[in-house]
């Protein structure tokens, strides 16, 4: 008799019942969609014997029949169909709340955004960041590559928290913290006569065709090289300005000339057919800085600075 869908004592059905749990809504909704206890139990990840018991307890709790079932068939009752609409709204609200809480947790995570000048990435920075992450493994760390001008603009706009660069800024809204000095090296093709020694002077490169890889793409280092030209019979000839260390190494290996770059630039692009020779005299070292806003640094930036300084030469 399907017209009577109440179960148990009719008086008990009129009594207030305790609110349903999310687990009960989920069990009911999955069974209502599958109309098959074995498939529903598998989908829910519970034992097949547990689901019939849970459904009987649910029907007893609310005092109505939700399913008609035989040994071969399971059918949703009219009351069950109405409850299914409600259950779906409850479960959708729960999912929405869960996602919203997850987003709040993600937005509340510590975040540090660091920009690297396009030509300064090196193992020293990687070692410092690795040390920093040992105590901030849950922090959202972003590392991006930027030109010197873009680095400055994004720090000013608050898009980056700090930058590592060879550029020293006199803007009062910015602070430059010195990290280390980066010495120059000459990249020579293997077999070149100057590659046989242990170190060179800038004067040794007179009359050579040179390619410059500056820490900043502003021309400052090229001017610095020109300012320190040795007095020799023939001036230094700067023929190329390569944009990446890899391009410079390819140019050198091809026998096009000799490259000038800093030691940390060279360490990341070791090449079997290119020899890096230190320049012991002729060029002052490039100074590497952490560039940040003049506002008091956050604890994350302060701790990263400590790690960077601990790894400086």
Image (cartoon, rainbow, N blue to C red):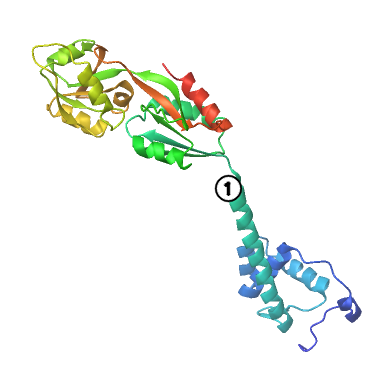
- Residue sticking out furthest to the right: 11
Image position of 54 with respect to 157: above or below: below
Between residues 203 and 219, which one lies in front from this camera angle?
A: 219
Q: Secondary structure at mark 1?
A: helix
Q: Nearer the viewer, residue 5 or 176?
A: 176
Q: Quadrant of the N terminus?
A: bottom right
Label 1 neighbour load within 10 Å: few <14, some 14-19, many 20+: few
Q: Quadrant of the C terminus?
A: top left
Q: Which residue is mark 1?
A: 107
| x 22%, y 20%: residue | 225
Tell me, yes or no, if residue 45 can be seen here.
no
* Percent position of residue 210, x then y: 16, 24
Percent x, y for residue 92?
63, 66
Residue at 64%, 69% (x, y): give it.
30
Quarter-wise, where is residue 284 in the image?
A: top left
Q: Quadrant of residue 277?
A: top left
* 187 displayed left or right of 94: left
Does residue 20 appear anywhere in the picture? yes
Which residue occupies 37% across, 18% down?
Answer: 181
Name the outermost residue toward the left. Answer: 233
- Where in the figure is residue 70, as x and y percent of width and height? 70, 80
Front in this rendered view, residue 61 or 56: 61
Q: Give the quarter of the image for residue 165.
A: top left
Q: Nearer the viewer, residue 192 or 298?
A: 298
Rendered location of residue 293, percent (x, y): 49, 33
């Amino acid at each position: 008799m399907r017209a009577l869908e109440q179960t148990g004592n009719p008086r008990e059905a009129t009594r207030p019942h305790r609110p349903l749990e999310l687990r009960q809504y989920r069990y009911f909704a999955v069974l209502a969609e599958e109309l098959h206890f074995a498939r529903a139990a598998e989908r829910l990840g519970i034992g097949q014997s547990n689901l019939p018991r849970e459904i009987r307890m649910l029907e007893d709790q609310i005092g109505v029949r939700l399913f008609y079932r035989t040994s071969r068939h399971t059918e949703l009752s009219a009351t069950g169909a109405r409850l299914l609409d409600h259950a779906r709204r409850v479960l959708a609200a729960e999912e929405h709340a869960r996602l919203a809480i997850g987003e709040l947790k993600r937005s509340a995570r510590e975040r540090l955004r660091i920009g690297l000048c396009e030509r300064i990435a090196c193992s020293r920075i990687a070692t410092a960041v690795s040390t920093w992450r040992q105590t901030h493994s849950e922090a959202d760390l972003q590392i991006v590559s930027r030109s010197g001008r873009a680095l400055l603009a994004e720090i000013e706009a608050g898009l980056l928290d700090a930058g590592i660069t060879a550029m020293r800024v006199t803007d009062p809204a910015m602070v430059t913290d010195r990290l280390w000095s980066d010495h120059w090296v000459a990249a020579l093709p293997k077999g070149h006569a100057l590659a046989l020694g242990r170190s060179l002077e800038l004067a040794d490169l007179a009359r050579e065709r040179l390619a410059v890889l500056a820490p900043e793409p502003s021309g400052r280092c090229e001017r610095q090289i020109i300012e320190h030209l040795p007095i020799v019979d023939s001036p230094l000839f700067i023929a190329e300005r390569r944009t990446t260390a890899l391009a410079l190494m390819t140019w050198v290996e091809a026998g096009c000339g000799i490259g000038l770059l800093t030691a940390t630039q060279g360490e990341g692009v070791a090449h079997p057919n290119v020899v890096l020779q230190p320049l012991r005299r002729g060029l002052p070292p490039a100074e590497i800085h952490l560039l940040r806003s003049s506002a008091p640094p956050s604890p994350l930036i302060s701790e990263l600075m400590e790690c960077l300084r601990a790894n400086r030469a």
